[in-house]
Image (cartoon, rainbow, N blue to C red):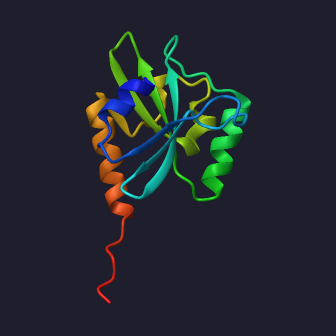
């Protein structure tokens, strides 16, 4: 899932896979897209659910409280599609059935990347003329 994501981001995107040794609970990937930084936790859907560790839930909630942006990108091998969720919904995601969680995107990697690019453009302010 990490390679698929990296291959589909725009060429000038900074993408860093984060090793488990860095800190307990921190998301799997750090991305800077058009000057906007965010983290994405990569997950595989098993038995129609996403399992999160307590440390992952705590990290995403804490990061959200600091106005940071994070996501969960979950892959459903049986459906051959991806689901993108807001990181702030970590508690809601834990143990819930996929169809019971509000997702941002349900679709292909291209649809996920298009959403991320669109969201980043909203946050970018034009340079001043002065």
The front one of 50 and 126 is 126
Closest to the observer, 127 or 104: 127
Q: Quadrant of the C terminus?
A: bottom left
Residue at 38 percent of width and 31 percent of height = 5
Q: Which residue is drawn at 63% across and 50% down?
A: 63
Residue 22: % across, % down? 69, 36
The residue shown at (49%, 15%) is 48
Q: Quadrant of residue 96?
A: top right
Q: In this view, does 30 lie above or below 78?
A: below
Q: Which of 99 and 79 is in front in this view?
A: 79
- Image coords of residue 15 (percent x, y): 45, 40
**Residue 72, relative to residue 74: is it above or below?**
below
Q: How many labels does the image show?
A: 0
- In this rendering, would 74 be left or right of 93? left
Describe residue 80's horizontal placement relative to residue 14 as left or right: left
Give percent across and percent down for residue 61: 65, 46
From the viewer's perspective, tell me whether residue 102 is left or right of residue 119: right
**Residue 78, position as x, y percentages in the image:** 38, 9
Relative to residue 76, is residue 21 depicted above or below?
Answer: below
As drawn, 67 above or below 58: below
Image point 31% across, 49% down: which residue?
A: 117
Q: Which quadrant: the N terminus?
A: top left
């Amino acid at each position: 899932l990490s390679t698929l994501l990296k291959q589909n981001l725009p060429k000038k995107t900074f993408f860093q896979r984060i090793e488990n040794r860095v800190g307990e609970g921190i998301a799997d990937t750090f991305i800077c897209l058009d000057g906007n930084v965010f983290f994405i936790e990569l997950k595989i859907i098993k038995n129609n659910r996403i399992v999160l560790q307590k440390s992952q839930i705590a990290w995403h909630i804490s990061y959200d409280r600091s106005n940071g942006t994070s996501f969960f990108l979950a892959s459903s091998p049986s459906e051959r599609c991806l689901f993108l969720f807001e990181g702030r919904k970590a508690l809601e995601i834990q143990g819930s059935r996929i169809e019971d969680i509000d997702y941002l995107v349900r679709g292909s990697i291209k649809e996920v990347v298009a959403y991320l690019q669109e969201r980043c453009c909203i946050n970018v302010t034009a340079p001043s003329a002065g």
